[in-house]
Amino acid sequence: MSKRKTQAALLALALFFSASPARPQSVKLKVAYPTTVGSMGVVWVTKEAALFEKHGLNVEMIYIAGSSKIVQAMLAKEIPISEIAIPAVIQANLAGADLVMLAGPNHRPGQKLMVKPEIKSREGLKGKKLGVTRFGTSDDFLLRYILTQWGIQPDREVALIQMGGSQEVLAGLSSRAIDGGMISSPLNLRALKLGFEMLVDLSAIGVDYQGAGVVTTRSYVREHPDVVRRYLKAYVEGLHRFKTDRDFSLKVLAKYSRIGERDMLEETYNHYAVKVMPRAPYPTMKGIRLVLDEIGARSPKAREI
């Protein structure tokens, strides 16, 4: 991404935060999220803290397993705003979509590759079945990325299986339908309690990666600039609340992740709110470039961006 495009994107984001009416008219808005792990913490907290309502938005939160499914709903104009990661955005745009990420506080991958205890090394993955939520999602992209880094060919030496959602990946591990899977906090902690091993923690390998963030279409921004501005104001306040109000955030994480164990919730909060997310939700250009480079290895169009 050129320096000029980067500056233009940051300028556009800044303009969204200019003054808006003191008493905004309430607008109904459907917002989709693709997973029940901690990377969704900001949008959940923003909703539960009534910050959307503060800015005149009546937000209906909709869970749709997998970013690729959400993209389909957005292109059909069923969902105007979502919380998805950059691989789905880029791949949709390469196919002609007009998606744009306006904010992105997830700058490190939270996924862990959890495997059966008998798999002791990366070489032990060959011939095995590994679960992801859906093809085209962060789980899928990052698993393919790490396998390639290890010299293992996805789809040839290892079978990648679509499971649906993060809970379904965990269920597939539990039932032994798959030999391993990509799971994020807090579900990876549940997998550990079930006896599975962590083969790699992607957050610990020093990779800049643009995870989940606020995504809409350029046409929606043009047609509803005030709604987008209000949404981003609420979102920034939600990020601050997530990072500074531990007790409230733990309750919200428990509600949406359906995890009740305090230790698992604490670990999830520490990873995302303390370690991963910055104070300002600007997307990471290095993280976006990583995705462009990897997709560019398979799609010449991505090299032109």
Image (cartoon, rainbow, N blue to C red):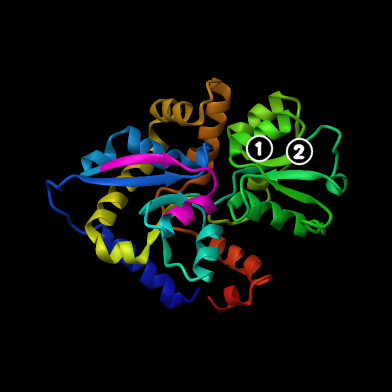
Q: What amino acid is labelled 1 in the image?
A: Val
For marks 1 and 2 on the same chain, the one whose residue lies earlier in the sequence: 1
User: Is residue 58 visible in this depiction of the protein?
Assistant: yes
Question: Callout 2: helix, strand or loop?
Answer: loop
Q: Which residue is mark 2?
A: 178
Decide: is 178 above or below 24: above
Image spot of residue 267 (x, y percent): 57, 30
**Residue at the front extreme of this rendering:** 76
Q: Quadrant of residue 53?
A: top left
Question: Residue at 50% of width from left, 61% of height from top?
Answer: 89
Question: Callout 1: helix, strand or loop?
Answer: helix
Residue range highlighted in magenta = 58-73
* Relative depth, front residue between 90 and 77: 77
Neighbor class of circle 2 (other Cα within 10 Å; few <14, some 14-19, many 20+) is: many
User: Is residue 206 visible in this depiction of the protein?
Assistant: no
Question: Residue at 77% of width from left, 56% of height from top?
Answer: 155
Which of the numbered marks, if any, corresponds to residue 169? 1
How many tags in the picture? 2
Instruction: Give the side of residue 288 with respect to residue 159, left or right.
Output: left
Instruction: Give the side of residue 106 with respect to residue 177, left or right.
Output: left
Neighbor class of circle 1 (other Cα within 10 Å; few <14, some 14-19, many 20+) is: many
Image spot of residue 92 (x, y percent): 51, 64
Decide: is 52 above or below 151: above
Q: Are marks 1 and 2 in contact (CB under 8 Å)?
A: yes
Question: Residue at 45% of width from left, 38% of height from top?
Answer: 41
Q: What amino acid is labelled 2 in the image?
A: Ile
Distance Cα–Cα, label 1 vs label 2: 8 Å
Image spot of residue 45 (x, y percent): 38, 36
Question: Residue at 25% of width from left, 54% of height from top?
Answer: 227
Which of the numbered marks, if any, corresponds to residue 65? none
